[in-house]
Image: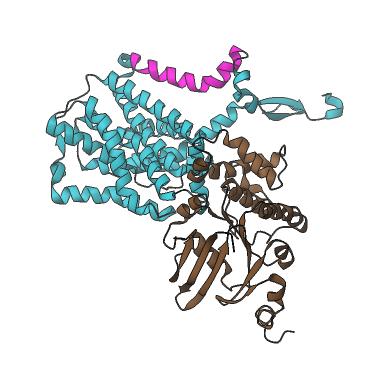
Amino acid sequence: MKEELILKLDHLSKHFGGVKAVDDVSFELRDGESLGIIGPNGSGKTTLVNLITGFLKPSAGQIFYRSKEVTNVRPNKRVQLGIVRTFQMVKPFYNLAAYKNIVIPLYSPRVKRLKGGKYGDRDDAAIDFLEEVGFERDSSVLYKTAGTLPHGYLKRLELARCLALQPDLLILDELYSGMSMSEVASTLPLIERIKDEGMTLIMVEHRLRELFRVVDRVIVLNFGNKIAEGNPIEVTGTEEVKKAYIGSGGE
Amino acid sequence: MVQAGYRRERLDRGIKARSDEVFLISSYREILYTLGPWIVPILLLIVFPLFRKVIGIYWVNVSVIVCIMALLAISWVFLASVGLMSLGQAFFFGVGSYIAGFFGNNYNWSPLFTIPLSTFGGAALCALILLPVLRLRGVYFGLITFALPLLLMRIIEATKILGGTEGLSGFAPFPNILIEYYLVIAVLLVFILGFRWVFDTDYGLVLRGIRDNDRAILAAGMSVTWFKTQAIFLAALPGTFAGALLTHHYQFVGIPSFSMEFSLLPLASAIVGGPGTFAGATVGAFILVPLSEILRRFGTLRMVIYAILLTICAVGLPEGIFHYIERKYHQFERLVPIDVEKGGK
């Protein structure tokens, strides 16, 4: 393959006491590729995201980012390298206005470096990013405190926070959960566009139909183990994956 | 009593339009309305000691203590705005006091040198000492800050360093009380305006963001610990300054510098005055400290009356005195006829 290797997980494990949340998972991801991570609840998807982004330290194994080992690099340093994530449980700044939520990532050292020092007016830039994720530019919603916004808005706010950081590798942890059908429908073209522009994506998702429109490849996790990897349609057709999702009695 | 057939209508003045600079310079009334709440108290504070012959020098001294407590209170508000719940403002105060005391006692330095040194050096030292506990949140951080001054007190007592229980004394005093008074007023104003400015910048936004969600700060690529360290340094500045100033004021420093009074009174000032604002905390100190002085004539009953008044205040005005006054300032009332058909408008 001609694209550069961006992420490599080498026999990664995370154990909480006796529970093997992630057990010996390995995979590689190339620049511009988009990868889906699926699996039933509790299969270790979010733990895997926390390991990649540094919010958890692995019990064993190594993580390489652009052929440099980042296993013990702190989460904020990984963001500076370009690994940016959304949270499944949204983490806005509840007491700040919606657009101020995006001003904070624009203050980040990563953005400062990419913009060569000064950013200019962060308020304007923040509103641009919010418009990109579907907020209306002149809406009063932008000036409301984030704590008063509905869940779907907060999810999009979360996405705007990530885009403001101009990621190299964007990890979306169940972006669509808690969004209404219309919100999903309006966000999907944005994700497709981000992908077409060449961003490397990892998406953890339960909504398979929306996921398969974006990703080239999926990994299926069950009880922390990688049980399948490959083309989305083919993988979900295999007996083992069906069993993991539906249970052994399923079709 | 409202006149029969009428009801009282309460309206907000247009605060947002007024805060706009263009509106501000449109007339002297606008200027007065917006800047009056700042200028009037400042002018009162400036002329206050000129009447010291009438009022008594005692109350000028009390005013210095008021400003000391106000400095510690705005320091508390700063930390609270970053999500750090401090229960030990005496820590900053004591560190500032002892640094000034050490150099004043050993080298007989004048306040001109010891005060800047203890303010900045002391704040850096405080940030360094608190560095290992910055990971703690909420009440856990509060407990550590509560224990720290008590711990330092016992260390000094047990090891007899820095004068032990006897303390240090005999430093260069201020030339006169007026210089001290105007210095502390000026510094208090600089800190109030400076801190307000900090929180208006994008840097201050990050600090406020830490209180809301420190993991989101981390996910935005910034080190929470580093920002908290800077916050401790900034918040410690008024505290260490206050300590250094009072050391030269009394020409004495001892373990009472770490006493709980310097932790609890600023906290009470911030809460009674109006939590969350620097001006509110200052208003709180300007009410509580003189009140405490007036109550001295009741002897032992002083603390009982004081506690009752505090409780009444906290229950009756949970928003704080400052917010109450601010709200009333921006509202006006008028009488409106109740019966619309008969009453006309």
Who's the residue at 59% across and 29% down the image?
Answer: B328
Who's the residue at 48% across and 19% down the image?
Answer: B39
Question: A134 or B298, which lies in front?
Answer: A134
Tell me, yes or no, if residue A58 can be seen here: yes
Q: Which residues are magenta?
A: B27-51
Tell me, yes or no, if residue B301 can be seen here: no
**Depicted B9 relative to depicted A56: above or below:** above
Q: Is residue B49 magenta?
A: yes
Question: B55 or B96, which lies in front?
Answer: B96
Q: Where does the image place residue A183, in percent across and percent down from the top left?
A: 74, 54
**Depicted B334 relative to depicted B213: above or below:** above
Query: Mainly helix, strand or loop, the magenta region?
Result: helix
Question: B119 or B273, which lies in front?
Answer: B119
Q: Where does the image place residue A127, in percent across and percent down from the top left?
A: 65, 39
Who's the residue at 48% across and 31% down the image?
Answer: B197
**Total marks placed:** 0
Q: Is residue A44 left or right of residue B12?
A: left
Q: Where does the image place residue B36, in percent across and percent down from the top left?
A: 52, 19
Q: Quadrant of the N terminus of chain B?
A: top right
Which of the 4 image quadrants contains residue B236?
Answer: top left
Identify the colour of chain A in the image. Answer: brown
Q: Is residue B33 magenta?
A: yes
Q: Is residue A18 left or right of residue A155?
A: left
Q: Quadrant of the C terminus of chain B?
A: top right
Q: How is the image coloured?
A: by chain
Q: Which chain is cyan?
A: B
Question: B276 or B198, which lies in front?
Answer: B198
Q: Where does the image place residue B327, in percent across and percent down from the top left?
A: 59, 31
Single out the residue that lies furthest toward the front: A2
